[in-house]
Image (cartoon, helix red, strand yellow):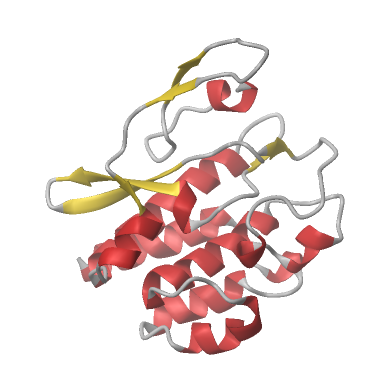
Amino acid sequence: MEIASRCRHPCLLQFIGATNDEGSPLFVTELMETSLRALLEQQPLSEKEVFIISFDVARALNYLHQKQPSPIIHRDISSANVLLWRQGDQWRGKVSDYGTANFMQQTMTVAPGAMIYSAPEAFTARNQTVKIDVYSFGVLLCEICIRELPDPKRRNQQVAMVINRMLRALIRGCLQPEPATRPNMEEIVEELEFDIMERF
């Protein structure tokens, strides 16, 4: 609740308020049409939709990672936590669920969020960085491109199924085992924005 109330961005699900019951607090947020996971189960996305939705998710994560005085790590990026709305005939994405988010300076639990999206260091490292979200973003981007739920045992095989060379290279960069060698979200936003302007 504390984190959600501090965050305002067009690519984050808008937090409106909450009840303060001790039992189970009730969150009030804006209403969205569907989730990315539900849409991927129903239909393939156009290349433009893949780029635009990925760009929206990247912008949301970049906003969280740039927060001062301490970056916010989402730690649970998945297709179920990307909600969609319509802008004309185009699906747009918003990142939801701050349940596992945390300020970087605070002690963190090991292996938060959905395991199939988690970076290798999520299972061992207590001092997690924003690069944990970069890894999950790479897994999510692969899922968007191939419409298959992530399978850590088939990770390389799934990445090889991505047809678009630029996106495949970006995914591979995000999935580097060593966190320091992954791009940051600001670089990913710039790359996706450039490609969107060039292509569409």
What residue sits 46% from the left and 27% below the top? 8
Asked if residue 50 can be seen in this view, the reply is no
In the shown orientation, is residue 49 left or right of residue 104?
left
Compared to residue 97, the image places residue 152 above or below, namely below
| Image coordinates for residue 174, horizontal then vertical, percent | 60, 69
Residue at screen point 55% across, 27% down: 4
Tell whether 196 sits left or right of 175: left
Q: Quadrant of residue 125?
A: bottom right
Give the percent coordinates (x, y) of residue 113.
65, 51
Residue at the left extreme? 88
State the residue in front, 149 or 92. Answer: 149
Residue 189 visible, this orientation: yes
> Residue at horizontal 58%, vertical 18%?
25
Number of numbered labels in the structure image: 0
Q: Of 100 and 184, which appears nearest the observer?
A: 100
Q: Is residue 117 above or below residue 154?
A: above
Question: Which residue of the protein is positioned furthest toward the front in this rendering?
Answer: 23
Hey, which quadrant is residue 176 in on the image?
Answer: bottom right
Question: In the figure, 57 relative to 49: above or below?
Answer: above
Q: Quadrant of the N terminus?
A: top right
Q: Position of residue 121 (x, y in %)?
A: 79, 63
Image coords of residue 118 (percent x, y): 67, 62
* Placement of 6 over or under 195, stated as above or below: above
Give the position of the C terminus as an image quadrant: bottom left
| Residue at 81% over, 61% down | 123
4 sits to left or right of 122: left
